[in-house]
Image: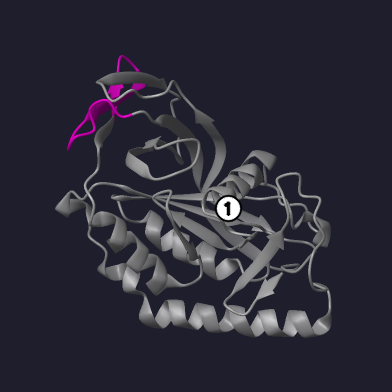
Amino acid sequence: MGEQDGREGYGGHAGLKAAFVGAFTESSYTHIMKNIALAARALFCATLGLATLPNAAQAEPAVVVELFTSQGCYSCPPADEVLGKLAEHDDIIALSLHVDYWDYLGWRDTFAKKAFTRRQFEYRDSMGERVVYTPQMIVQGANPVTGSRAMSVRDAIAQVRSTDDLAKVEIVERNGGLKGLITPVNGGEGSSAVVYVAKYTRSETVQIARGENGGKTLTYHNVVGMLSPLKDWRGDIAEYDLPNPGPGEGIALWVQGGKVGPILAAAKFER
């Protein structure tokens, strides 16, 4: 269902068989969504609180921000811009995960994967929510916010920084390859968690021919092409073999308290 805070929502279950509420193709809806998108973009530019986030010199622990977005979602471009600004920070792991449930609107998202749609539905279920929507950001696996609301995103990042990481995650080059190193800290010994690795392209520009964004040329940031669990972490010192990113690509590694859930620690490596 369409929301008046710059979101487009989809109810139902993981099988994506539930009915939509509202007629997304009606002209009134399109007019409303255009106004929302313009207002969100203006707020983003005028108030960009993200500029006050810590920089790499302050050595803050990394925060993972997952944006569930779609090329077929009219209200998503402002959130894609927010994610692009987040990606500029060394201590933020900003990831763009494209979902496929808006493909029916006339444009098939060229980056969408069913696995990312399932991941968003799993977050929904774990948080007791009734619907999923775009653009949605999940901050550190626990804090859901509307992705186009830059100030809310900033506040969510600040909130997770108030708690200590339970692990230290590092990505190092060794013998021509990459290794992921995880060490328990702050009482993280004996923890049980899932280790994820993601590979992403740092920038992709797409000409949208049809759908709600038809005629636009949009740039996406940190577009995830691969997201996979590795061997579970048991709260000890552990080492993992990681894929090697090419030019313009990056690797993210994080420890998460379950298939979805709070993220305990994370790191990234980019070329």
Q: In this view of the protein, can residue 47 be seen by the observer?
A: yes
Left or right: 133 in relation to 30: left
Task: State the residue at coordinates (60%, 81%).
Answer: 36
Displayed quadrant of residue 18: bottom right
Displayed quadrant of residue 51: bottom left
Displayed quadrant of residue 240: top left
Task: State the residue at coordinates (51%, 78%).
Answer: 41
Task: State the residue at coordinates (76%, 44%).
Answer: 15
In the image, residue 240 sits, relative to residue 118, either above or below, namely above
Residue 159: percent from left, percent from top: 29, 61
Residue 168: percent from left, percent from top: 23, 34
Task: State the residue at coordinates (82%, 60%).
Answer: 19
Left or right: 254 in relation to 199: left
Residue 123: percent from left, percent from top: 54, 49
Looking at the image, which is closer to me, 16 or 187?
187
Q: Quadrant of the image for the C terminus?
A: top left
Secondary structure, mark 1, is: helix
Residue that badge 1 annotates: 124
